[in-house]
Amino acid sequence: MKHLFLLFAGMLAFACDIGAQVTRSLTENIRTVQVIVGGNPLAAPVAKMGEPVEVSFDALTHAYARYIYNVELCNADWSPCDELFESDYLSGFNNQPIEDYETSFNTTVLYTHYRIVFPNEDIQLRLPGNYRVRIYEDEYSEDEEPLVEACFSIYSPEMNVGLHVSSNTDIDFNQRHQQVTFDVAYGARRVVDPQRELHTVVMQNRRWDNAVVDLPPNIVKGNGAEWTHRRELVFPAGSEFHKFEILDVRLNGMNVDRMEWLDEQYHATLFANTPQHNYTYTADADGAFIVRHSGDEDNATMSEYLYVHFLLQMPWLAGGDVYVTGLWNNGVADPETRMKYDDELNAYEASVLLKQGYYNYQFRQMDDDGVGHTALTEGDFYQTENEYLILIYHRPQGARYDALVGYAKVNTNGNN
């Protein structure tokens, strides 16, 4: 346990720089913050109106803490929606205690798993849009920093969104990029000025660091708009995610070189990775993860925490630090996942405390703007299977909030 608090010392200093739309822990003893839509841990945090949304996290102790959750509606840019009253967007009573919790069983790292599901008997969410759940200890206070922030979106399917991805881009043809084209049909919604009324978000593999936000359409029709041949919608294709699985802490799982028990803590060392020079297909989950163990029951409370050691074998890179990332840390560049270069090994290495299960990961070099690049650490290949998401918000003239009324998802292998 003594290693846990050393890891978090840098994380706390970094937390204030993470975007407001990112699900995250803001304290040293809370881990594995998840938003699960419709019971599917691999799904994007975007729910259809009425679909259940689960928010959960682990506090690294068996001691009970009284956590309070506060729900707020946000604008398309994730700023607070101050033009509405709380009663406009939720029914019931906000600032309720989390009553669904359970301590871990037979684990070396003691933790308590907390869980909230929306809708519940206390709160029902009434409007389509962005929601942020903040967790506080003992009581809610606007003057205090939360311990946890969990972000998700709820949409009402009022506008139809057409989405297409091609490797024939405005930069190259079947080389290193993929280009998004999309169109929106307004349906029953009346849109007078699409450039002012519509807010759009285009994401690759749910990444916020390279998301394209509020790009105006270049074709406007009476009943819709199109975004076509926009150079801003050309994304580096990247490569397939690496993956590992640890179901039993005493056995080497998928892509695990060795398991060890050191300093009263389990350690898993993965096989070393190297940048790819040619495309290699491997099925992945586009950065997602699933918490589970070999018994595959009570995964939330019977899965172990352990240190996972990552190794990227390559020469040192100038121009920016290298990070190991995935949806388990929302792809952000935090101190814990920054890789240090070992001159003797000629490799980058990092150790991250993770909960037992199946994980995707990728190595990215971060630029000064916090955007991760895979060109040198992974390679960019037009064949790569990526997930693209489109979010369409509408705020007509005189409206007081951004309603999420269009949503589309496509994988470049053709699966929606």
Image: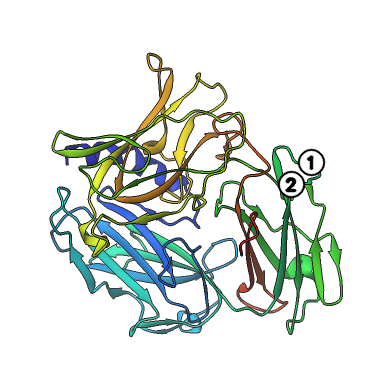
The residue at the point 43 percent across, 67 percent down is: 40
Q: Decide which of 72, 277 is in the foreground and name it.
A: 277
Q: Decide which of 400, 172 is in the foreground and name it.
A: 172
- x%, y% of residue 236? 66, 41
Asked if 297 appears above or below 222 in the picture, the reply is: above
Residue type, numbered disc 1? Phe
Q: How many marks?
A: 2
Question: Is residue 178 among what the camera can see?
Answer: yes
Q: Earlier in the sequence, mark 2 or mark 1?
A: 2
Asked if 127 appears above or below 321 in the picture, the reply is: below
- x%, y% of residue 126? 50, 83
Residue 277, label in figure: none
Asked if 392 appears above or below 289 in the picture, the reply is: below
Question: Is residue 145 among what the camera can see?
Answer: no
According to the image, label 2 marks what residue?
167
Is 4 on the left or on the right of 151, as rendered? Answer: left
Residue type, numbered disc 2? Ser
Image quarter hosting the C terminus: bottom right
The residue at the point 15 percent across, 63 percent down is: 64
What SS does tag 2 mark? loop
Is 185 on the left or on the right of 327, as rendered? Answer: right
The residue at the point 60 percent across, 65 percent down is: 76
Residues at marks 2 and 1 touching, judged by CB atoms closer than 8 Å: yes
What SS does tag 1 mark? loop
According to the image, label 1 marks what residue?
173
